[in-house]
Image (cartoon, grey):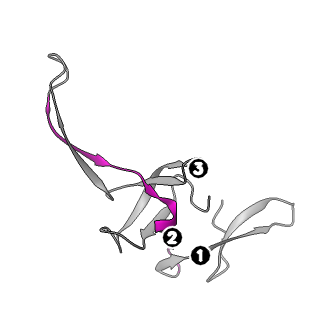
Amino acid sequence: MHIKSGDTVVIISGKDAGKVGKVLKAFPDKNRVIVEGVNMITRHKKPMGPTEPGGIVKYEGPINASKVMYYCSKDKKGVRVGHTFLNDGKKVRVCKKCGEVLDK
């Protein structure tokens, strides 16, 4: 996948298009990601004993990784991600627009 946990991404399609958020969790096997503040799901939860109260709970749902682009802080927009090898032979992700190395 071109996106990892901790990356800042921009949503390119759907009801949350244009929003920028941080990837909280990535599921490479399902090609889905959970982005902070995007695809909010509402659940009406029953109380489960005295320690866990009920109520309306909102949380982020997973979205397809093809609907997000890496957000380059230098270019201030969504960019495509490429791969290259460093001099020491390590494979890293790079910004296709400015050439900046994304993996630290």
Check contact, mark 2 vs mark 3: CB within 8 A: no
Q: Quadrant of residue 81?
A: bottom right
In the rendering, at what x and y percent does residue 27 appear? 53, 47
In the rendering, at what x and y percent does residue 31 appear? 55, 54
Q: Which region is colored magenta?
A: 54-74
Instruction: Specify whether 65 is left or right of 49.
Output: right
Name the amino acid, label 1: Arg
Residue under numbered circle 3: 28
Name the amino acid, label 2: Met
User: Which residue shows up at 19% across the image and 20% down it?
Assistant: 48
Residue under numbered circle 2: 69
Which label's residue is closer to the chain start, 1 or 2? 2
Quarter of the figure that contains the C terminus: bottom right
Distance from disc 1 to disc 3, alpha carbons, whole Å, reads 18 Å
Q: Nearer the viewer, mark 2 or mark 3?
A: 3
Vertical order, 84 against 76 (above or below): above
Residue under numbered circle 1: 80
Disc 1 crowd, CA 10 A, few/some/many (<14, 14-19, 20+): few
Name the amino acid, label 3: Pro
Distance from disc 1 to disc 2, alpha carbons, whole Å, reads 7 Å
In the rendering, at what x and y percent does residue 2 appear? 61, 62
Q: Secondary structure at mark 1?
A: loop
Distance from disc 2 to disc 3, alpha carbons, whole Å, reads 15 Å
In the rendering, at what x and y percent does residue 4 appear? 57, 55
Query: Predominant secondary structure in magenta?
Result: strand
Quarter of the figure that contains the N terminus: bottom right
Vertical order, 49 against 79 (above or below): above
